[in-house]
Image: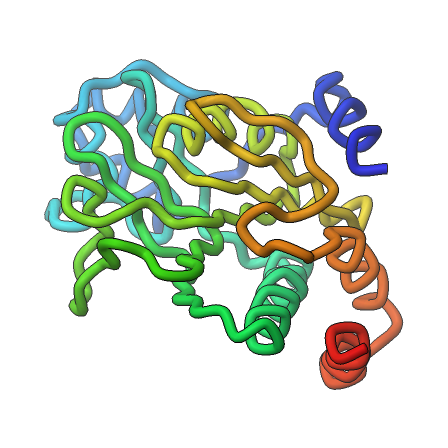
Amino acid sequence: MIQNLAAAAVDGSDSPAAIAISPAIDAAIDRLSPRLAAIARASFQDWTAATWDEFLAIAGEQEPDGLPQTHAYFFQSRIKLEMNPLGKDHGRFNNAPLDVVSLFAAFQQLRIVRYINTTLRKTGQKECQPDVSIYIGEVTCLPPAGNEVINLDRSDPPSLVVEIAASSIADDIGVKRMLYENLGVQEYWVIDTQRRSLIAFSIADGRSGVISQSEVLPGLDLAIVDEALRRTDENDDAAITRWLIEKFSA
């Protein structure tokens, strides 16, 4: 089923509608130079050509005129901006992958370190803010403590990255997938909130393929994530946790 969902998503049938930019972001864009403002507005619709310096001026967290309340991506000299999701589906469906990974790791006695909505940066080249980043097992170089971005010039990339696709899944399994391939992430999950299902990719040597069994969490059948997502509509979080505990302790 996972492969069929991937094929359905690639056909472009769920192209996003025009983005309504929030008043706070709109006001911040107006403070930029005309060129930067044009790049910023275009990048909410599609990946837009920009230099690294232009990207930092628009979205860099240390820039005084940087845009607030946005997820910012930079890859192949292009910028893509997304408003921080406020919808309940996006927030709700973050829980299932986190619960599955955490409980499975606990039962398997695996070490994990989780980051939510945290920036990953390869200076001058790439930047992204995945919904979930997870380091699994004995990672050589974990990010140090502190409130800076995760600098991939000094730290290893996450073992697993998760994106919650509440609007345009085509971008998540398209350009963003290529971005995570390039960053050296080992496994990439896309949660399709409309279909209540997972599309998962294993990444090696800069290429990826659809999988139904996790490779960074050996022994985890990814159909469990699908089932946890479906149960979210009719069960509270505690009931789903009890179900997962039963599955992993069997």
Whether residue 236 is visible to the viewer of this picture, yes or no, is: no
Q: Residue at 49% across / 69% down in the picture?
A: 110
Q: Residue at 65% across / 34% down in the picture?
A: 169
Q: Could you tell whether 129 is left or right of 225 in the image?
A: left
Residue placed most toward the observer, 182 or 52: 182
**Which color scheme did the rendering employ for the protein?**
rainbow
Q: Position of residue 96 (x, y in %)?
A: 67, 64
Q: Residue at 57% across / 33% down in the picture?
A: 172
Location of the C terminus (image quadrant): bottom right
Q: Could you tell whether 8 is left or right of 214 in the image?
A: right
Q: Residue at 16% across / 34% down in the picture?
A: 123
Whether residue 81 is visible to the viewer of this picture, yes or no, is: yes
Residue placed most toward the observer, 39 or 31: 39
Q: Could you tell whether 100 is left or right of 182 in the image?
A: right
**As drawn, 178 above or below 120:** above
Residue placed most toward the observer, 109 or 23: 109
Which quarter of the picture shows residue 7? top right
**As drawn, 204 above or below 148:** above
Q: Position of residue 247 (x, y in %)?
A: 80, 73
Q: How many labels does the image show?
A: 0
Residue placed most toward the observer, 231 or 140: 140
Q: Could you tell whether 28 is left or right of 7 in the image?
A: left
Q: Where is residue 66 in the image (x, y as percent from the top left)?
A: 20, 44
Q: Position of residue 77 (x, y in %)?
A: 28, 17
Location of the N terminus (image quadrant): top right
